[in-house]
Image: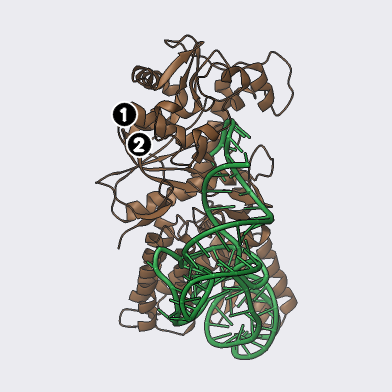
Chain colours: A brown, B green
Amino acid sequence: MSLVVTDTQSDERVEFTADGDVTLYVCGLTVSDDPHLGHARLWFHADVLHRWLAYLGYDVRHVENVTDVNEKITARVGERDEWTAERDVAETFTASTFEAMRGLNLLRAEVYPRVTEHVPEIIDLVETLIGKGYAYESNGSVYFDVTRFDDYGTLSNQDPAELEAQGDPAERSEKRNPADFALWKSGGVSEAAAREHAKHDHCGATPSGERWDSPWGEGRPGWHVECSAMSTTHLGDTLDVHMGGRDLVFPHHENEIAQSTAATGREFARHWLHVGLLEMEGEKMSSSIGNYWTVPDALDELGVDVVRTFYAGAAYRSEQALTEDTIAEAEERWDRLSRTYDRAVGALDAVDARSKAEDETLRGAVETARADFEAAMNDDLNLREATAALLTLTDAVNRHVDGGTPHDYRGLRDAVTAFEELGGDVLGLGFDVRDGGDVELAGELVELVLDVREAEREAGNYDRADQLRDALREVGVEIEDGPDGASYRFE
RNA sequence: GCCAAGGUGGCAGAGUCUGGUCAGACGCAGCGGCCUGCAGAGCCGCCCGACGCCGGUUCAAAUCCGGCCCUUGGCUCCA
């Protein structure tokens, strides 16, 4: 059984193939603001692909760029006192981006290359393109001539002749064809562009952003060429997988293909995977619309596991709706998974777990869950079905734990391992992660309160017992009465 | 206007490539039961019932063909 993915190039399900290491390039963030849940959706799906390929035995070389040169970044200079240059703003949000990524429990990429580190490579690439006749200099800027590249438009199925012109009016007059795009822009950020992207009015001179020397004079790299240069620098001419948001298909990825293929003469990416957009109230979540939820806020409010469970509720290639209902569903799903995991671990470590007890139903359920999970993952990374396989396993585990003692040690251990390997390692859910603080002491204190509560219950003082339970819930301790007395878990 | 993705039960979301076998699994919402001092969790069971619209092909269409409507995205910075 092998992995099948939906490739944007052919729009067909194709078998995933790679020789040895898998090179994975993800079009990363422009660091002009805190990342929001839309950006994180791409990160999540790239992360799960990374994790699944690792599970299948591939060594994954994952590179995700940081775009730290951009008009939107420049436009925020001066908004805070410490933001005196484009670089200051970029560094602030690069830091918050990394923090968000860690908070989302993403596997680290091999490198997070930044544009500011790769200007020499970008200039080399542009010179190569000029040398091969694919690009031309005009007024200190350099443009890619789309008429020289026969396959231009095949990824997005666009006809260059039908396209509206790219770039602003001043730029258009410098170009041979309306659809030509900039590889290098002369000078700094124009005042018009800076103003357009500015969110807030602020005093002082309009910032023009950083500039670099080049064979064509001072200027700034074009957006599309950055990704071509950074991916080639770190992963070579041909990528196994190129991922990005669906909104980048045109022009960004189309242009990347043109630049890289023209420069190297080789296929740029074997597989293109595009992640559908996150919708909020029927619209794309976007900083410019303002309907966004930042990653730090979402992590505070929901926790990383609910956020990840939410993302696992829809296929990467589909759009996904963020609503109260879909969030509530994710909360329920994660609660059910983690609760069951805790119960299984509890039963496993109890004296009632015996080496010779055997529950064929439980063991069969574990095997079925593993098989279903793997089949779902290989079927174009169907995360909702994969999650469903784990949820089906919760049923068998709960039935076993409810079914009295002795417990089937081996069966429970296999179930726990399945949760950890499939839910934990592959989906990145934190089954065995416990919050910080002195958990042991907290546990002892909770036990103490529970002893008091038990005494009250035995005395028939249920009001008092319920008060204690409510009080514990308020500080984040959930009490559940069972046949063997009360148990608790930290929320 | 051009390009792309999509429209499936109350929600969410598979299935469309390979026309018929279950419009499937899981979860949420709803109902009943077990358990329980109550609650929660858990378990068992259940109702309901959807393939955007109009044609065509076919013994048979969610699935193939044609037309139309609607939604979202891209064509300008965008994950």
Query: The disc labelled 2 sits on which kind of residue?
Result: Phe
Q: Quadrant of residue B18?
A: bottom left
Quadrant for the C terminus of chain A in the image: bottom right
Q: Is residue A85 visible?
A: no
Q: Nearer the viewer, residue A413 or A294?
A: A294
Q: Residue at x 40, y 71 (%)?
A: A369
Rate crowding at label 2 as few (under 14), some (14 to 19) or many (20 or more) other CA atoms within 10 Å: many
> How many numbered markers are drawn?
2
Q: Position of residue A386 (x, y in %)?
A: 44, 64
Query: The disc labelled 1 sits on which kind of residue?
Result: Thr
Disc number placed over residue A284 in the picture, else none: none
Quadrant for the N terminus of chain A in the image: bottom left
Secondary structure under badge 1? helix
* Circle 1 chain: A
Q: Is residue A373 visible?
A: yes
Q: Residue at x 38, y 52 (%)?
A: A51
* Residues marked 2 and 1, same chain: yes
- Which residue is label 1 attached to? A264
Secondary structure under badge 2? loop
- Which residue is label 2 attached to? A268
Q: Position of residue A302 (x, y in %)?
A: 61, 54
Rate crowding at label 1 as few (under 14), some (14 to 19) or many (20 or more) other CA atoms within 10 Å: some
Q: Nearer the viewer, residue A442 or A382?
A: A382
Q: Residue at x 28, y 53 (%)?
A: A57
Q: Position of residue B51 (x, y in %)?
A: 59, 69
Marks 2 and 1, how far apart in space?
Answer: 8 Å
Q: Quadrant of residue A478?
A: bottom right
Q: Are marks 2 and 1 in contact (CB under 8 Å)?
A: yes
